Amino acid sequence: MNKITIVCPHCGGVNAIPLKDSYLKAACGHCKASLLDTKPLPVDAAVFDRFMLNDERLIIADFWAPWCGPCKSMAPSFEEAARSFPLKAQFVKINTEEHQQLAGRFAIRSIPTVIAFKNNRIVDQFSGALPASEIIRWVHRHL
């Protein structure tokens, strides 16, 4: 049976789980928390790099800042979109004020900017706020 390697959003443990079309339940082998949690995860550079190096799923990163109006207006849409991809994609949020070096690594010039990563590579990105339906459509193109 094919397996996929994923990083637990709760403890950072690396798990190899059977690859399926959908999951009714999946628990971390380390902390036993559900791997089906879809809430976008706030990350720093260390956590981001752990996902980049150890997680085989699509990683969807929202680069944002607390003072940014469009970022705040898109946040609920980003969360709603994340709910459509349990164990298919990991949605993360990177506060560009707190993690300027991480934003600099990807030459973020305007926010919000959302980048899709696969196998530690950028596969696509967009800037500006989108509704959940557009984010979902965009993510589906890269799965």
Image (tube, rainbow, N blue to C red):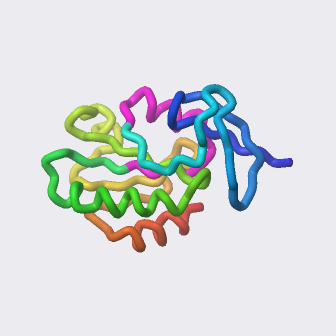
The one nearer the camera, 103 or 136, is 136
At a point 20% along the width and 60% down the height, the residue shown is 70
Give the side of residue 84 with respect to residue 79, left or right.
Answer: right
Give the side of residue 49 with respect to residue 119, left or right.
Answer: left
At a point 69% along the width and 55% down the height, the residue shown is 23
Can residue 96 be seen here?
yes
Give the side of residue 66 with respect to residue 37, left or right.
Answer: left
Q: Position of residue 12 (x, y in %)?
A: 54, 29
Q: Position of residue 105 (x, y in %)?
A: 34, 37
Where 10 falls versus 74 (above or below)? above
Can residue 117 be seen here?
no
Give the side of residue 130 with respect to residue 2, left or right.
Answer: left
Q: Position of residue 9 (x, y in %)?
A: 51, 37
Where 45 falls versus 2 (above or below)? above
At a point 44% along the width and 62% down the height, the residue shown is 81
Quarter of the rendering containing residue 45: top left
Tell me the magenta residue range: 43-61
Magenta residue check for 81: no
Where 102 falls versus 78 (above or below)? above
Q: Position of residue 143 (x, y in %)?
A: 59, 61
